[in-house]
Image: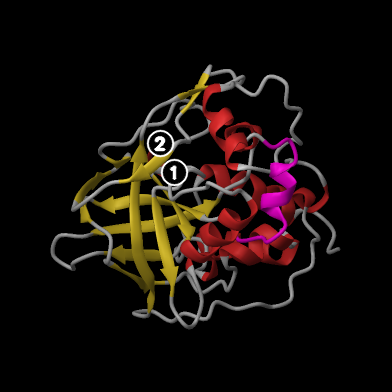
Amino acid sequence: MTPGVLEAALADDGTDLEPLPLARVLGAPHACADGRHKNEPSPFHDGDVVGTVTAVCAVVATRPDAGAAGESSINKAPVDGPVEVHRLGVVRDHQSDSAHHGGPDKALYLLDAAEQEHWAGVLPGLTPGRLGENLLIAPGPAGGIDDVEIGAILTIGDPATGIRARVTGVRNPCPTMARGVGRSDWVETFSERARVGVYLSVLRNGTIQAGDEVRLMVSPGHRVTCTRWFAHHDPRDAQAMLNSEIFGNCVLAPFTRKYVQTASHEQIG
């Protein structure tokens, strides 16, 4: 892999690539995860600082893509200064494939800054925003953005002018992402670390910028973190999240609930 591969991927629609399917295949046992969690709780408590925004990114230019939409908006870059965020995300950003990306439940995609740095070592020339992330979050000493519970509510930025948002689920790496970096094995490779980043829905509009704190406002209490769910899709965790929703402690986005409901009926691996 050389910087030239990433540069070429911007102009090539990836037709010649044969990437693996989604990392999570609905209906497969444990949705292609191992089905047995290790009881990894979230390291955060209500009110804790989760991390710090290091970059707010928006689309630079679309690239041709062999997917149904015909183009991809995965190529993003940092935006200077304060950035307005509303229910559909960063005001200067957009998605090309609205059937699978964006919308109120996937308004913002957050990636751990440490993960971006790791992947930059794998993909020379990888710059912030190139994996499609809207926000890069530098982790604190306790953990990172993937260590919050699904359904947790976060605040980002100044208490008066920043945003409030809910963690709606994890990113399932897809062929569009593989074509965006020019690697047919990318879905499997990116999934191996199980720190794939999280999606947020925006509950309160506001303004954010690099340097803002990300703080945990309230957790549902079901103990299922984003990385734990992605790595295991354990039926016991699925049942815990459904019970949390029934008792009014958690709101599950439809794109997450379909996997949770499927996993909840499987035998424990």
Give 86 or 114, whichever is nearer the viewer.
Answer: 114
Provide the residue designation for mark 2.
103
Name the quadrant containing residue 120: bottom right
* Residue type marked 1: Lys
2 left or right of 7 in image:
right
Q: Is 120 situated above or below 236?
A: above
- Residue at 53% x, 53% y: name it: 169
Point out the stretch of residues depicted in magenta.
183-196
Residue 206 counted in the magenta span: no
The answer to whether residue 72 of the structure is visible from this angle is: yes
As drawn, the label of residue 201 is none
Provide the residue designation for mark 1.
106
Give how far across and how far down residue 193 sits, in percent.
68, 61
Secondary structure type for disc 2: loop
- Distance between the alpha carbons at the discs numbered 1 and 2: 5 Å
CB atoms at circles 1 and 2 under 8 Å apart?
Answer: yes
* Residue type marked 2: Gly
- Residue at 45% x, 47% y: name it: 133
